[in-house]
Image (cartoon, grey):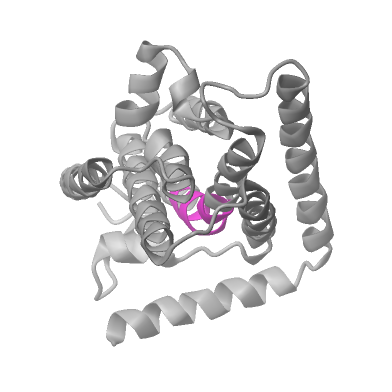
Amino acid sequence: MRIIKLIWSYLRIGVANEMQYRVNFFIQLLQSFISLATGLIGLWLVFSHTTALSGWSQPELLAVMGVYLLMGGIIKTAIQPNMQRLMDEIQNGTLDFALTKPVDGQLLISIREFRFWQLTDGVVGLVVLAIAIIQIQERIGIGQALAFVAALALGGIMIYCFWLILTTSAFWLIRIWELVNLFEGLYAAGRWPVTIYPNWLRLGLTFLVPVAFAVTVPAEALTDRLTPLTLLGAAGLAILLMGVARFVWRLGVRSYSGASA
């Protein structure tokens, strides 16, 4: 209950801060529509020359885009802002204010920032996803829906762990922003199923940067492509990344020298 109250408190503070700048909603809405328009133009260009892309039909690729926008909204709302703040505090030596609080440090640095207006991407993604499901014209069963939710949750956990590992490297590295930009570029590849890429890139987007598990695997659940073995593998990889992220975080904290050092 204490953790839930803490998360709720930071959530309310984040929403209150965002409400001070309501014009940002319209800016973010415009950005969301530009991103959507870019993706739709890409789909139109592809399917003006073919009827399927690596076995994926147009409505199914629209579902992939919906998941991509939805997960992107989650990342920009709750994951990326906290990791960017952590990176700044490590480099400025002000992380002490979080580490000295009577609560787990990793939990605290993961919930302090909440960009409410960034949820626009998530809402747009849900709308695109709903349209795609209607166009697929196949009944989505309870099993597929549960598999989709589970895959999306596991993908979000893996993205969070990857971001934490990436950001924690700021304890030892200086030019960390280049790595962040690299992740954003690689995540953009998630607009399309990873199965359309060469094997070397597919492996990279699956195990080095978990874009496949964050976008393609949830989309596979909705299009009846996801196997129980893949979902089980996603759960195992998520647990492994959680352990690695926790280890790297604690190792970084032990080597941290901040303002109170």
For the stretch drawn in magenta, the main secondary structure is helix
In the visual, does 155 lie left or right of 62?
left
Examine the rendering and report whether any part of residue 173 can be seen.
Answer: no
Quadrant into which the N terminus falls: bottom left
The span shown in magenta is 73-83
Classify 42 as above or below 166.
Answer: above
Q: Nearer the viewer, residue 203 or 175?
A: 203
In the visual, does 205 lie left or right of 188?
left
Q: Nearer the viewer, residue 103 or 126?
A: 126
Q: Residue 248: which quarter of the image?
A: top left
Magenta stretch holds residue 120:
no
Q: Nearer the viewer, residue 27 or 87?
A: 27
Q: Residue at horizontal 25%, vertical 73%?
A: 103
Horizontal and vertical percent position of residue 17 = 65, 72
Magenta stretch holds residue 74:
yes
Horizontal and vertical percent position of residue 54 = 52, 21
Q: Residue 106: which quarter of the image?
A: bottom left
* Residue lying at the far front of the rendered structure: 138
Q: Residue at horizontal 54%, vertical 65%?
A: 114
Examine the rendering and report whether any part of residue 9 can be seen.
Answer: yes
